[in-house]
Amino acid sequence: MARTFNASRFQILTKIVIPANISTFINSLKVNIGLSLVGVISGEFLVSKAGLRIFNSIWRSGIPTRLSNGERCDTCSCSSNYV
């Protein structure tokens, strides 16, 4: 219909195509930002020893480990004594 009113390609793009796709663009940004944050946090867990200290302490608090002397560490705040 825009062609019948002699609209240029630029006018069709700016007046019809972009406004029609704004909601899709915003929704895809929301999903991709969330997935990128999940990737960053899981990458921190896998690669670094210090990592994000808050998330690292929460993650390690649920994993009981054994110390080098055989005792069980339930607080997991002693990172230098892990076996």
Image (cartoon, rainbow, N blue to C red):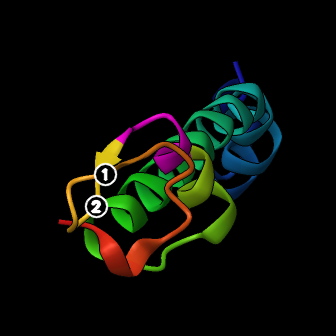
Q: In which quarter of the image is the N terminus?
A: top right
The image shows residue 69 at horizontal and vertical percentages of 22, 65
Q: In this view, does 46 lie to the left or right of 62?
A: left
Up-down relation of residue 8 to residue 34 (above or below): below
Q: Which amino acid does label 1 sit on?
A: Glu
Query: What residue is at 65 percent from the left and 27 percent from the top?
Result: 24
**Residue density around tag 1, few if under 14, some if 14–19, many if 20 or more, within 10 Å:** few
Check residue 19 in the rendering and tell me which mark sits there, or answer none. Answer: none
Q: Are marks 2 and 1 in contact (CB under 8 Å)?
A: yes
Residue 49 in view (yes/no):
no
Up-down relation of residue 5 to residue 41 (above or below): above
Residue 39 in view (yes/no):
yes
Outermost residue on the top side: it is 1
- Residue ID for mark 2: 67
The image shows residue 29 at horizontal and vertical percentages of 64, 43
Q: What residue type is labelled 2?
A: Leu
- Residue ID for mark 1: 71
Q: 64 or 68: which is nearer to us?
A: 68
Q: 9 or 74: which is nearer to us?
A: 74
The magenta span reads 59-64
Up-down relation of residue 14 to residue 68 (above or below): above
Q: 36 or 79: which is nearer to us?
A: 79
